[in-house]
Image (cartoon, rainbow, N blue to C red):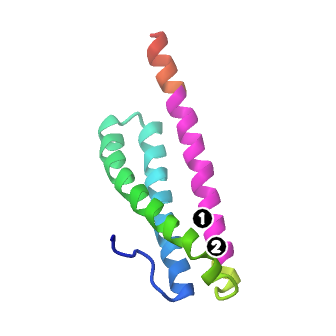
Amino acid sequence: MTDKILPEEPNAAVEKMMSLAQECLNLVKAETLAIDKNNLAMFAVNESHKGKAFDFYTRAAGEFRERMDELQGKVNPTLITELQRIQLELQEQAERNNVQLEQIEGLKKEG
């Protein structure tokens, strides 16, 4: 059995998810900076950290989904709204980076 990532208390569990999502967002923003500056070293170091952070976040999200029924109605709605905002920003930024990386890969294949 793996150790639990999220605290038992519902609001604390959402706050932990917010923290993990924000950490992933920060790493995706660092990835954006590395792409924009064409800095392969910065990109490589960031990718290592990003992979670990996203693995942890994915495990926590799985726990969160398993506890949805338990958490329903017990969590401050403001926390849920903020978690959703961070997750949306994370998704949008990651999608933009993926498009940029695909374009760069396409240029490499052409060149």
* Magenta region: 80-102
Residue 45 within the segment the image draws in magenta: no
Location of the N terminus (image quadrant):
bottom left
Q: How many marks?
A: 2
Give the residue pinned by disc 1. 86
Where disc 2 sits, the SS reads helix
Q: CA distance from mark 2 to mark 1?
A: 6 Å
User: 98 or 74, which lies in front?
Assistant: 74
Give the residue pinned by disc 2. 82
The residue drawn where x is 33% and y is 43% is 42
Q: Residue 37 got which mark?
A: none
Left/right of residue 89 with respect to residue 2 in the rendered view? right
The residue drawn where x is 48% and y is 72% is 19
Mark 1: few, some, or many residues within 10 Å (few <14, many ≥20)? many
Residue 100 within the segment the image draws in magenta: yes
Quarter of the view holding residue 108: top left
Q: Is residue 64 above or below residue 8?
A: above
Mark 2: few, some, or many residues within 10 Å (few <14, many ≥20)? some
Where disc 1 sits, the SS reads helix
Cβ–Cβ under 8 Å for marks 2 and 1: yes
Q: Indicate the position of residue 16 as horizontal and vertical percent values.
A: 48, 76
* Amino acid at circle 2: Glu
User: 55 or 2, which lies in front?
Assistant: 2
Left/right of residue 84 with respect to residue 49 in the rendered view? right
